[in-house]
Image (cartoon, rainbow, N blue to C red):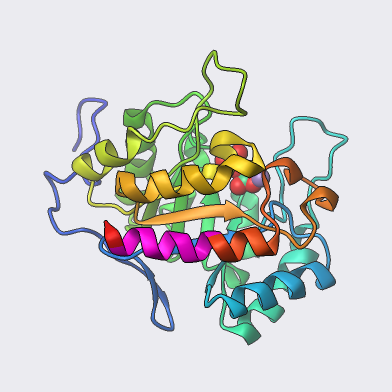
Amino acid sequence: HIVSDEYKLVSKKWKVKPTRIDLGDGIAIQDGEMAIITGPCSIESEEQIVKVINHMKENNLTMMRGGVFKPRSSPYAFRGLGMDGLKLWYRLAKAAGIKIVTEVMQVSQIEEMYDYVDVFQVGARNTQNFNLLDELGKVDKAVLIKRGISGTIEELLQSAEYVFSGGNEKLILCERGIRTYEKASRNTLDLNAVPILKSKSHLPVVVDPSHGIGIREFVPQMALAGVMAGADGIIYESHENPDKAYSDGQQTLNFAQSSLLADQIRKTFAMR
Ligand code: PEP
Ligand code: MN
């Protein structure tokens, strides 16, 4: 029984050995390896999915991100293809041996999404949706929890504790930038969080430079800075034609940029 508002089970005091997130088929996210997760902000069409999958296969990438339920600031913006999009994506990704990382926005979606998802993403707007975290604690699938938009490192760990204490230990922590007074970038990517999270928790830590800085041309260098900060993975947005993307095109890499970055991530990690 935990009396205070501390976290416990996700801490290194509870478990020293780093937690390995096994996604099956030899694909894992873990300390000592470098996971590369890429794909569009939003899943848009069959043609788009096929193009991303082909790009990923050319670069030996096995973990694909993409939203089918999109949390958009404006209700008039594209809000995703929903379950139809997820089922289409699942069929294509499965055939290609690619794992699916996608955001779940509310409790009622967990069950319908379950069969088609490898990693449930909890978005930065839902980091403290405690009902959602409780329900994800009961699920036997990996969960990637993003740091809240204005969330502290401790709050991220407490959110992870919700899921972990509910019985689901397959957790990945994600630094995706926080809101600060700085307006020159979309968010402030807090790379301090990487060594701090790694020192406090046994869970793997990934960095999202796309949402972290929000400016396409600077995403690669922030990704590599994340690798050097000690991240266990990088999650970034890519698209065949970012300027035509339905969401977050301004921070999305094209395939040539993505291929280069994937290569640089591997080389930088090998040097670390
Ligand atoms: C996303 O990954 O596209 C996304 C909406 O991320 P975040 O929750 O970090 O804003
Ligand atoms: Mn996005």
Magenta span has 263? yes
Observer-nearest of 29 and 90 = 29
Main SS of residues in magenta: helix
Position in image of residue 213 (x %, y %)? 57, 35
Which of the 4 image quarters holds residue 18? bottom left
Where in the image, quadrant-wise, is ligand 1 located?
top right
| Residue at 53% across, 59% down | 261
| In the depicted structure, whether residue 120 falls above or below residue 185 | below
Q: Where does the magenta region start and end?
A: 261-270
Position in image of residue 62 (x %, y %)? 52, 74
Q: Residue furthest top?
A: 181
239 horizontally vs 101: left or right: right
Q: Is residue 90 visible?
A: no
The C terminus - image quarter: bottom left
| Residue at 66% across, 64% down | 256
Position in image of residue 10 (x %, y %)? 25, 46
22 horizontally vs 125: left or right: left
